[in-house]
Image (cartoon, grey):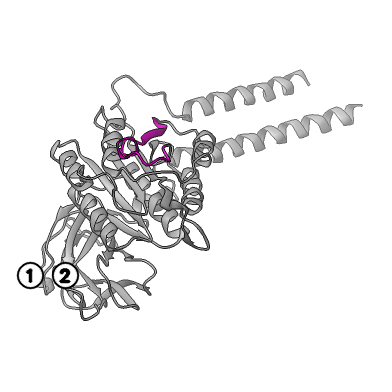
């Protein structure tokens, strides 16, 4: 009986040693240092016009607060996020004071979601729209280090504090070479607001989006925050061709182009066996367009056979339409597998009213990525766990040893019961 007890104790000790041996080793001093956490500052317009009730039956301010709460819940842990306001504090008519009305509501740093939501809840539509000063303040808030930096400006109107032109402010920020991107979102914007916000975004390589509904605002801000957390690359200007044979060959990255109404543009990407092509495209209607339109993204072989397609339609509720596709290329036998040239076709079915200019073309944003396909041999061998294969082995061995231990204990208890 004593011998059986020692056997059980020995099995437990062996199990502990096994787990310790399979557990991941602690980091060592010469391992590469992780990159600096990305920084994002949300700049929110809290001017008097945000009282207007034209977004899903509620005020623009209420819609912005709801969207902010949803965005704050979804912010990636690695992002250092801050919030700045403009027009939130001074309700008077003194232009000089009104054009200084911008402050940091929540400092850029690790996010306390409850604290940030509480700060946003206190806001009420108040004063002026000093976009230029707010952008300068946000740029200062994000200073320091080599992290990815992004300003997301949400406003319902153009700047009211000229001659400090916010578009010139954006150009000055871009000229500093600090790699700070400004994205702009217009809440039910008029033509002047569209033009100004588009100019601000283009000056720094950012994007402009018009928003008519709360869910659109929440989705777009979340996308931009996630992009800061996992940036592809700085957007690269390219020019698609009229046919695949003349198309530019693209590496993984983010590209910008312009496409005429109803036009088809072609690009080429090389994909090796065992890799997966992931591509997405967004086309922005930066001017008035007729309702009912769509965007098509196709992957085609050099011989014209369609591989896969993605499409999305719109009806005038938003001026940004996006779609995407995925193409996993199967593994091939042989020592030197050849890359396949995949032709990407971007098409749109936009049309414009008679008085609207169709030149230049509409802005296109194309994202291309090539990764190891999910069905690659290494993934199959590890049952989809990637580098976590050791965990599967640990669980199997732990279950095996635990089963042996339980069997020994059960046999010992039966033997004791019989002797008694």
Q: Is residue 15 above or below residue 248?
A: above
Vertical placement of 242 versus 28: above or below?
A: below
Chain-order first, disc 2 or disc 1: 1
Percent position of residue 123, x then y: 49, 41
Could you say which disc has been placed on residue 266 in the image?
2
Q: Residue at x 61, y 34 (%)?
A: 401
**Secondary element at image label 1:** helix
Asked whether 105 falls inside the magenta stretch, the response is yes
Image position, residue 392 (x, y; %): 50, 42
Is residue 143 shown left or right of residue 245? right
Name the residue at 19% across, 78% down. Answer: 304
Residue 253 at x, y = what percent?
21, 52
Q: Say whether marks 2 and 1 touch (CB < 8 Å).
A: yes
- The stretch of residues the image draws in magenta is 90-108
User: Badge 1 local density, few (<14 within 10 Å), some, or many (20+)?
Assistant: few
Q: Is residue 293 above or below residue 53?
A: below
Quarter of the rendering occupied by the N terminus: top right
Structural crowding at the residue carrying mark 2, measured as other residues with C-alpha within 10 Å and reported as few (<14), some (14–19) or many (≥20): many
Q: Is residue 94 magenta?
A: yes
Query: In the displayed structure, does residue 244 sit left or right of residue 283?
Result: left
Location of residue 418 by image quarter: top right
Q: Position of residue 274 (x, y in %)?
A: 28, 57
Viewer can see residue 219: yes
Q: In the rendered image, which residue does mark 1 sit on?
A: 246
């Amino acid at each position: 009986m004593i011998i059986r007890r020692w056997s059980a104790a020995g099995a437990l000790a062996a199990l502990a040693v096994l787990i310790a041996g399979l557990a991941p080793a602690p980091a060592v001093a010469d391992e590469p240092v992780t990159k600096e956490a990305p920084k994002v500052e949300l700049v929110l317009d809290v001017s008097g016009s945000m009282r207007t009730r034209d977004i899903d039956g509620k005020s623009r301010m209420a819609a912005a607060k709801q969207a902010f709460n949803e965005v704050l819940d979804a912010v990636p842990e690695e992002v250092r996020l801050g919030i700045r306001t403009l027009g939130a504090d001074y309700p008077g008519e003194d232009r000089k004071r009104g054009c200084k009305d911008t402050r940091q509501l929540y400092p850029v740093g690790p996010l306390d979601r409850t604290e940030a939501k509480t700060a946003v809840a206190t806001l009420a539509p108040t004063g002026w729209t000093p976009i230029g000063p707010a952008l300068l303040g946000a740029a200062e808030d994000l200073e320091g280090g080599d992290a990815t930096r992004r300003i997301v400006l949400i406003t319902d109107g153009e700047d009211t504090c000229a001659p400090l032109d916010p578009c010139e402010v954006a150009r000055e920020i871009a000229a500093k070479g600090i790699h700070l991107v400004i994205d702009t979102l217009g809440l039910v914007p008029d033509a002047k607001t569209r033009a100004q916000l588009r100019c601000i975004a283009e000056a720094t390589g950012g994007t402009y989006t018009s928003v008519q509904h709360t869910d659109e605002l929440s989705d777009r801000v979340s996308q931009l925050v996630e992009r800061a957390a996992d940036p592809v690359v700085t957007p690269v200007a390219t020019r698609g061709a009229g046919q695949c044979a003349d198309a530019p060959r693209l590496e993984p990255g983010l590209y910008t182009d312009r496409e005429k109404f109803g036009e088809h543009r072609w690009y080429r990407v090389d994909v090796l066996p065992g890799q997966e092509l992931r591509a997405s495209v967004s086309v922005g209607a930066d001017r008035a367009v007729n309702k009912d339109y769509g965007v098509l993204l196709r992957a085609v072989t050099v011989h014209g056979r369609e591989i896969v397609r993605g499409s999305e339609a719109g009806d005038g509720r938003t001026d940004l339409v996006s779609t995407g596709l995925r193409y996993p290329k199967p593994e091939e036998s042989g020592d030197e597998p050849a890359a396949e040239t995949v032709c990407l076709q971007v098409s749109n079915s936009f049309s414009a009213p008679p008085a609207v200019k169709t030149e230049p073309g509409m802005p296109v944003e194309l994202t291309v990525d090539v990764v190891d396909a999910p069905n690659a041999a290494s993934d199959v061998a590890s049952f989809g766990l990637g580098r976590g294969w050791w965990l599967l082995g640990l669980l199997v061995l732990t279950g095996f040893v635990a089963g042996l231990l339980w069997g020994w204990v059960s046999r010992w208890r039966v033997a004791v019961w019989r002797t008694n």
